[in-house]
Image (spheres, grey):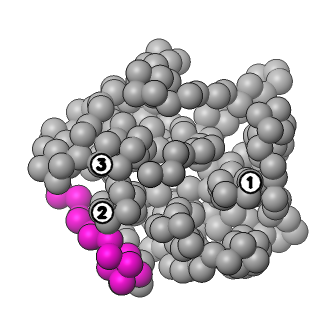
Amino acid sequence: VQAQHDAMAEAYRNTGVKVHYIEPEGEPSPNQMFAADLFFMTPEGAILARPASTVRTGEERWVARRLAELGVPIIRSVRGTGTFEGADAMWIDPTTVILGRGLRTNDEGAAQVSSTLNEMGVDVIQVDLPVGTMHLMGTLRIISSDLAIAHPYRFAHRGAEALKARGIRVFYLPEEKNSVSYTAALNFVTLAPHEILMVGGNPIAQDFYENLGITCHAVEMDELRKAAGAIGCTSGILEREKI
C-alpha cells in the first residue's frame, strides 16, 4: 500500500502537480489517507468536513492544522448534527456546485454547506444518492468545462439534467467485467482539461476515455483498493489553475 501510494504521489509530481501530506501526529488511522472526504475547497478557502463514520471522528482536525500551515483559510466547519464529507460535493462550473445527500452527508450537513456557498453567490444543486453509494464521487467525475463521466446506474437524473443544461456532455462508463474494478475506473482525478490520473488495470475504461480525447496516466492501485478507495479518494484538491 505504501509503495503504491508513493507511486501515485510521484505520478502527480511527474505531471506538474505539487503534493502535500496531512502528517498527523502519532499513529494515523487507516482511513486518514482518504483526504478527499475531509474538506471541500472553494475560491475563498476550505469547508472542513464532519465525517459521518464514527471511526473517522477527529480526522478533520489534522487536515485543519495542515491547511493552516499551508496558509489555506477555513471558511466553515460543519457542526452540530450535520455530517458532510468532501467527496459528496464538486464544482460543475465557477458558480455551481452539485452536492450529494446520502450515507455520508445528511440534510443538516448539506444545509450548512449550501448556506456557505450561497453566501458566496454559488448555486447548489442537491441530489439524493442511491442506497449502496458511499459518495457522489462514485457516481460522477468532471473532465472539463464541457465533459463529464458518470456511473450509468447511480448518477441521479436531476444531476444529469443540471449538467446538460450547462452545456456539459455526460458520457456513461461502459461495463467492464474483466477489470480490477468497475467502480475503480471512475475513481480518477482530473489533472487538466481532458487529462486524468486513473487506476491501472481497467483497459476498457481507458480505451473509452482515450476515444473521448482524454489523456490517461495509469498507476497500479490493487493493494490500496483493498481499503475500498483509490486515487480520487486519497486526493484532496487544494488549488487549480484557472484556464
Left or right of 18? Residue 15 is: left
Q: Residue at x 27, y 69 (%)?
A: 170
Mark 2 surroundings within 10 Å by alpha-carbon count, few (fewer than 14), some (14 through 19), many (20 or more): some
Q: Is residue 238 magenta?
A: no
Quadrant of res 64: top right
Q: Inspect the image, locate mark 1, and give the three-letter code of the amino acid beneath it.
A: Gly
Q: CA distance from mark 3 to mark 1?
A: 26 Å
Residue at (16, 45) in percent of width and height: 210
Mark 3, residue position: 194
Is 167 rendered above or below residue 208? Answer: below
> Residue at 30% across / 32% down in the picture?
217
Relative to residue 118, is residue 243 depicted above or below?
Answer: above
Binning the other alpha carbons within 10 Å of mark 1 as few (below 14), some (14 to 19) or many (20 upward) gives some
Dot 3 falls on a residue whose secondary structure is: loop
Residue indicated by mark 2: 147
Decide if residue 6 is on the left or right side of residue 46. left
Q: Which of these two is toward me, 137 or 183?
A: 137
Instruction: Kindly check if marks 2 and 3 are in contact, taking CB atoms under 8 A apart as contact.
Output: yes
Does any portion of residue 228 appear in the rendered image? no
Where 167 sits versus 47, above or below? below
Mark 3 residue type: His
**Residue 107 showing in the rendered view:** yes
Q: Are marks 1 and 2 in contact (CB under 8 Å)?
A: no
Q: Which residues are magenta?
A: 160-177
CA gap, disc 2 and disc 3 = 8 Å
